[in-house]
Image (cartoon, rainbow, N blue to C red):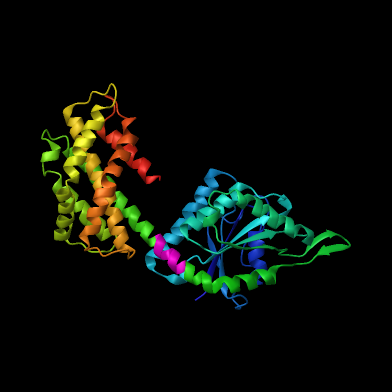
Amino acid sequence: MKANVIVMGNSGVGKSTLINAVLCEDVAPVGTGEAVTKELKVYESSQGVVPFRLIDSMGLEYSVASRLKLSRQVRKLSGNSVRSEDADSYIHMVWYCIDSNAKRVFKENIDIIHHVAKMWKNVPIIVVFTKAYSEYEDKENIRMINRILESYKYKDELNIRRVLSVVAQPTVINEDTVIPCRGLEELVFTTNELTPVAYQLAEAGAEEYKVRLERKQAQAIVAAVTTEATVVGMIPIPIPDSTILCPSQIVMLRMITKSYGLGNDKNFAKDMLERFLEVGAVTTAAHGVLNALKAVPGLNLAAATMNAIVAGTITFAMGQVYIRFVEGARVGKYRLDDYSVLDKLIKSDYAKVIANVVERYSGKLSGKNSVKEIFDDVLKDDSEK
């Protein structure tokens, strides 16, 4: 198996030139001015010169649009490799390239590195200063990186293993002076040296990434059933005393369990709903939401609207607590059949989720807002966290 190293950096820093130099082949297109690389491209040595693959990425500028585009590309690559469970396609390492002639490292540089590190936790990162024509500047480059990291909020999430300087191709300064290549052998050696631990971290990162994908699917299920519950809640019967929501909530719990690959048993989902009912969480929460709504100054909502908000809130909170329970079982913290853990989560977290949701939508409530609009905003806010 070969390690996959993604090469990142702003347009014009010389990523493609570096790839060609390391592989000793002209495989990556090189240009000046407009960025040449538009999509992720995977290259490897046809002659076996280096034992790892290099993934060329689009050149970045300090614009939100370019970062979002690269983010989508990396997320797609990561998602596909994790879903296929193909360890040979995981991202094992990052080379983040910075033009040494810029004489400055921006916070945005570190933000981009951090973004990839969030997708692949603890991925080893090598910062590569390209076009490093003067060896005297190498120490200053390291100092620049360290100065940014000292105050960077997420520095503990960055596994920056080395800061290296390279010249990827001979550069003519004048007719008497040519700066030769340098730093390439050290870069290859360091990459090979880090590969064993990179494999281990990639396996762990892939598992964590897979859990995040499962969580995203589970949250989508909660959003859909919450929206459905608000519609059901318009039915003119007292929600706290009715069981009309139970079928939808059973489906939600069942689908959440299935999304984490832990079964699809309808009877098990019924048992889980019973835990919420036995603890008294649903009735207590319903009364709590109603009291919170009545406490909003100047708010005058119809009874059906109040019921709809209550129905949506208790369903949403139920989904959030159950996701925490199932995900804990998924990662091996406890057994899925340990009902006592769910009971504890309901008692400790259910009311907190309710309060958090009420606080978030209370400012959006008015006689003009529909219930769907209110919960669309709440669910959107939650998905962006």
The location of residue 217, given as percent across then percent down, is 32, 54
In magenta, the rendered stretch is 202-209
Instruction: Classify the position of the C terminus by image quarter.
Output: top left
Instruction: Name the residue furthest top.
Output: 298
Dividing the picture into quadrants, the one containing residue 183 is bottom right
Looking at the picture, does residue 118 appear above or below residue 384? below
The location of residue 60, given as percent across then percent down, is 59, 51
Left or right, residue 135 beside residue 175: left
Residue depicted at 58% across the width and 76% down the height:
51
The location of residue 268, given as percent across then percent down, is 16, 60
Looking at the picture, does residue 367 appear above or below residue 198? above
Residue depicted at 32% across the width and 40% down the height:
356
Residue 74 visible in the shown view: yes
The location of residue 197, given as percent across then percent down, is 52, 71
Residue 13 visible in the shown view: no
Dividing the picture into quadrants, the one containing residue 137 is bottom right
Residue placed most toward the observer, 91 or 41:
91
Left or right, residue 366 beside residue 191: left
Left or right, residue 175 beside residue 38: right
